[in-house]
Image (cartoon, helix red, strand yellow):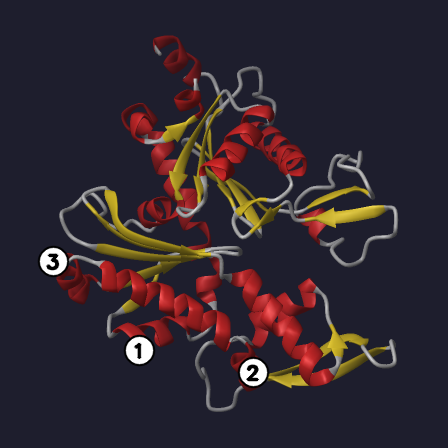
């Protein structure tokens, strides 16, 4: 144990928010050093990453839906968990080496944030992927806890704090008190489902097929959960006509996209209310004053704080820089790893 602590003084230890859409890496004392899409480009029919050394992250994301027959762009995580072990391992290895830079003579200790609702088998997959990607020791922390800490919520105090972390693959809802989760819920409905709802809307309403990147653009530019202006915008959408098979364009409005997003938004609201219903009366009483804090990239959907506030009767606020809350939370764990590592699940638990 003492030897490991000494090694920690010379290794580039890091915290990783291993997300369905984006992976963020922070280094102890430096903050977030990497924020890249969780996408890898491989040779078709194999798990071999393209050998140009840059076929991971942003470069690979730009290939989504545009690759030739010899290349496939893969998102190796689905609904917050690993769906392709080998590709995830290759992606983590690339990100770890990039974050280390030239200081890679001692393998790092790594803190990884995981959804609170994943199974033991899914946790084992995360531990194994990180170990094989080059980590010396791997520690797992639940995403809602990391998000709350990253959002600077007073989680150690004897009062209820509620976090709603909406990422790409999962929504994590938790009530935290005295540095632990009192009540939580995890649903595999999040930003990817917003995109899928938009894709389905374009098919049903306009007989038009659109790609993931176009759906994401629509969500970002005019997507909302509640009306956000007197004169809501529209935008031009380009895709392929499902009847003629030819490229075409059409105009869509913010109102119809809001209607398309209603189902996944409702599922998220139900998760929030379900968690509140399970809270002890004293915790519920605290939340009347403390309200709800929202984190995660998909919490930025316009009007989402409004509809959750209307459904719960509580004040709902966005955390500062919600996209990076989980990563910043892992950084805090890194700073206090010697104190907290016994409370975290780790690869050492398996030995």
Distance between mark 2 and mark 1 Cα atoms: 21 Å
The C terminus is located in which quarter?
top left
Q: Name the quadrant containing residue 317.
A: bottom left
Mark 3 crowdedness (10 Å alpha carbons): few <14, some 14-19, many ≥20:
few
What whole-number distance in Å separates the C-alpha atoms at marks 2 and 3?
A: 41 Å
Q: Give the residue furthest to the top.
A: 3
Which is more toward the observer, 230 or 63?
63
Task: Describe residue 228's horizontal placement relative to residue 129 as left or right.
Answer: left
Give residue 275's position: percent from left, percent from top.
29, 60
Which residue in the structure is indicated by mark 3? 282
Give residue 283's position: percent from left, percent from top. 16, 57
Q: Nearer the viewer, mark 2 or mark 1?
A: 1
Residue depicted at 32% across the width and 49% down the height? 148
Q: Are marks 2 and 1 in contact (CB under 8 Å)?
A: no
> Helix, strand, or loop for circle 3?
helix
Where residue 140 sits, quadrant-wise, is: top left
Q: Residue at x 64, y 45 (%)?
A: 76
Mark 3 touches mark 1? (CB < 8 Å): no
**Residue 310, numbered circle:** 1
Q: Is residue 236 visible?
A: no
Residue with the most extreme bottom position? 230
Residue at screen point 65% across, 69% down: 215
């Amino acid at each position: 144990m003492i030897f490991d602590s000494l090694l920690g003084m010379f290794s580039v230890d890091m915290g990783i928010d291993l997300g369905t859409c984006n992976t963020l890496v922070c280094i102890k004392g430096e903050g977030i050093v990497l924020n890249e899409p969780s996408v890898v480009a491989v040779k078709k029919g194999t798990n071999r990453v393209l050998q140009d050394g840059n076929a991971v992250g942003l470069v690979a994301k730009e290939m989504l839906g545009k690759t030739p027959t010899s290349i496939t762009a893969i998102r190796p995580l689905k609904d917050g968990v690993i769906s392709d072990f080998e590709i995830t391992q290759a992606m983590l290895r690339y990100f770890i080496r990039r974050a280390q830079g030239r200081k890679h003579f001692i393998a790092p200790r790594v803190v990884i944030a995981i959804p609170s609702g994943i199974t033991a088998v899914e946790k084992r997959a995360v531990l194994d992927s990180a170990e094989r990607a080059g980590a010396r020791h791997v520690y797992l922390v639940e995403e809602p806890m990391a998000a709350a800490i990253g959002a600077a919520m007073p989680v150690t105090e004897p009062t209820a704090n509620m976090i709603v972390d909406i990422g790409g693959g999962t929504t994590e809802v938790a009530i935290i008190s005295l540095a632990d989760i009192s009540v939580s819920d995890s649903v595999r409905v999040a930003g990817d489902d917003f995109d899928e709802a938009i894709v389905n809307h374009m098919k049903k309403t306009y007989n038009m097929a659109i790609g993931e990147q176009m759906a994401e653009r629509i969500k970002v530019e005019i997507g909302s959960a509640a009306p956000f202006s007197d004169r809501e915008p529209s935008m031009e959408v380009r895709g392929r006509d499902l009847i003629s098979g030819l490229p075409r364009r059409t105009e869509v409005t913010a109102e119809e996209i809001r209607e398309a997003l209603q189902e996944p938004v409702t599922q998220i609201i139900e998760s929030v209310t379900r968690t509140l219903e399970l809270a002890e009366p004293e915790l519920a009483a605290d939340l009347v004053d403390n309200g709800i804090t929202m984190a995660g990239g998909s919490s930025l959907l316009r009007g989402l704080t409004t509809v959750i506030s209307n459904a719960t009767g509580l004040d709902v606020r966005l955390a500062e820089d919600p996209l990076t809350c989980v990563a910043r939370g892992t950084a805090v764990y890194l700073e206090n790893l010697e104190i907290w590592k016994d409370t975290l699940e780790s690869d050492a638990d398996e030995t």
